[in-house]
Image (spheres, rainbow, N blue to C red):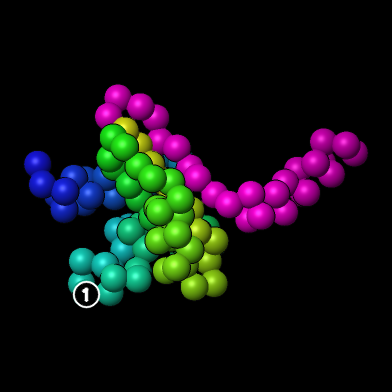
Amino acid sequence: MNSKQKGKRGELEWVKKLVFYGYQARRGQQYAGNPDAPDVVCDCLPYHFEVKRVEKLNLYDAMDQAARDCGEHIPVVAWRRNHHDWLIVMRADDWLPMQTEHIMEFVA
């Protein structure tokens, strides 16, 4: 399978994962000539998803790509290898502020 087909398949897998959890999601428009579009769009989440469906991945290169293209959204890399679960990669400076709300609930 060529890399373009595998990329499309990975994007569709990630869409199905989001839909399974109740989110409305679809593939992005990068196939229509917009290379900066996210691989997967989920309007109810503030993330720019860069989807990678490869065995080996340079996480920093993938995050750099997501950050370069994210605009006002939070860059996220969704990655899955064969026979493994999906992983989400975010920058700590994006993730930590979101935890404040959860910590306050836990402490209260």
In this view, the residue farthest toward the top is 83
Residue appearing at x 50%, y 59% in the figure:
75
Q: Provide the secondary structure element on which disc 1 rests.
A: loop
34 lies left or right of 97: left
Residue appearing at x 28%, y 35% in the figure:
55
- Give the image location of residue 66, x and y in percent: 43, 60
Residue 103 belongs to the span the image colors magenta: yes
Task: Say what amino acid the circle numbered 1 marks.
Answer: Gly
Count of numbered circles in the view: 1
26 lies left or right of 24: left
55 lies left or right of 41: left
Q: Quadrant of residue 102?
A: top right
Residue appearing at x 54%, y 72% in the figure:
72
Classify 67 as above or below 20: below
Quadrant of the drawing holding the N terminus: top left
- Give the image location of residue 78, x and y in percent: 41, 46
Residue appearing at x 54%, y 49% in the figure:
90
Classify 63 as above or below 17: below
Which residue does the numbered mark 1 point to in the structure image? 33
- Give the image location of residue 42, x and y in percent: 43, 59
Instruction: Give the extent of the magenta segment.
Output: 82-108
Residue 62 visible somewhere in the drawing? yes
72 lies left or right of 85: right
